[in-house]
Image (cartoon, coloured by chain):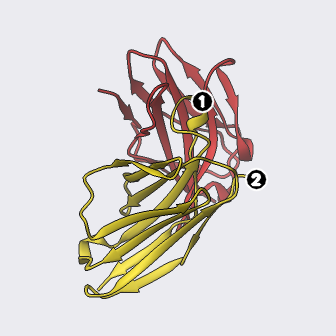
Amino acid sequence: AQSVTQLDSQVPVFEEAPVELRCNYSSSVSVYLFWYVQYPNQGLQLLLKYLSGSTLVKGINGFEAEFNKSQTSFHLRKPSVHISDTAEYFCAVTRDSNYQLIWGAGTKLIIKP
Amino acid sequence: DTEVTQTPKHLVMGMTNKKSLKCEQHMGHRAMYWYKQKAKKPPELMFVYSYEKLSINESVPSRFSPECPNSSLLNLHLHALQPEDSALYLCASSQDLAGGLGTQYFGPGTRLTVL
């Protein structure tokens, strides 16, 4: 069965510092990978996705992620965070033939002024 | 445009009430989803509609009743809910069910409180 692991439940980081949110998945077949962001008291917004092609994916709000098949990882990065990036970030995976998103537990990004 | 709208934004209801949640998308997507999200947890899938037909019911209690009147609209009818049903209810849509067309776009959610 597939699973998604977000190793860090919370990541505190100073404003304007770089950040990496980690996501690892387990699957023996091809997968599609997603990062969603949820701002306080809001719905989920798609940050970026990997379907195929270049392993470095750029998303909205200056975020990017790199698909690493050998390490089964899809870590999210931003070179310089802003206070407005305070949110919960969810990594999710689905298989080519399957509708169902398998979710990580989420990582809360806390920006320190 | 990747907008999914949901109404109402907040809903408070008693255990004997009947209410409905509404979701709308105008992206021409043919798959629509209902999720339930408890605080600090990822969303849990409840129902999936594909081409206006119910495809998946993830063993949801019958007090939740989905309806898809047309390709743009999805409703969730609520009746005799329990306090533990209080949660954020999220609607999502995708071009199709699976593969690269299965990228799901979410609405802002309805915050439901059952008294």
* Residue at the (54%, 78%) spot, across then down: B8
* Rendered shade, chain A: red
Circle 1: element type: helix
* Residue at the (25%, 77%) spot, across then down: B83
**What x and y, as percent, mark residue B109?**
52, 66
* Residue at the (52%, 71%) spot, across then down: B22
> Hey, which quadrant is residue B78 in on the image?
bottom left
> Hey, which quadrant is residue A65 in on the image?
top right
The dot on residue B17 is: none
Q: Quadrant of the C terminus of chain A?
A: bottom right
Which residue has dot 2 on it?
B1
Q: Is residue B22 left or right of residue A14?
A: left
Kind of residue sitting beneath label 2: Asp
Contact, CB < 8 Å: mark 2 with mark 1? Answer: no
Q: Residues within 10 Å of mark 1 (few under 14, many from 20)?
A: some
Q: Quadrant of the N terminus of chain A?
A: top left
The dot on residue B100 is: 1
**What x and y, as percent, mark residue A47?**
64, 44
**Residue toward you, B89 or A103:** B89
- The chain holding disc 1 is B
**Residue toward you, B80 or A85:** B80
- In this rendering, is residue A80 above or below A82? above
Kind of residue sitting beneath label 1: Gly
Residue A25 visible? yes
Circle 2: element type: loop
* Rendered shade, chain B: yellow
Q: Is residue B22 left or right of residue A106?
A: right
* Residue at the (38%, 20%) spot, across then down: A27
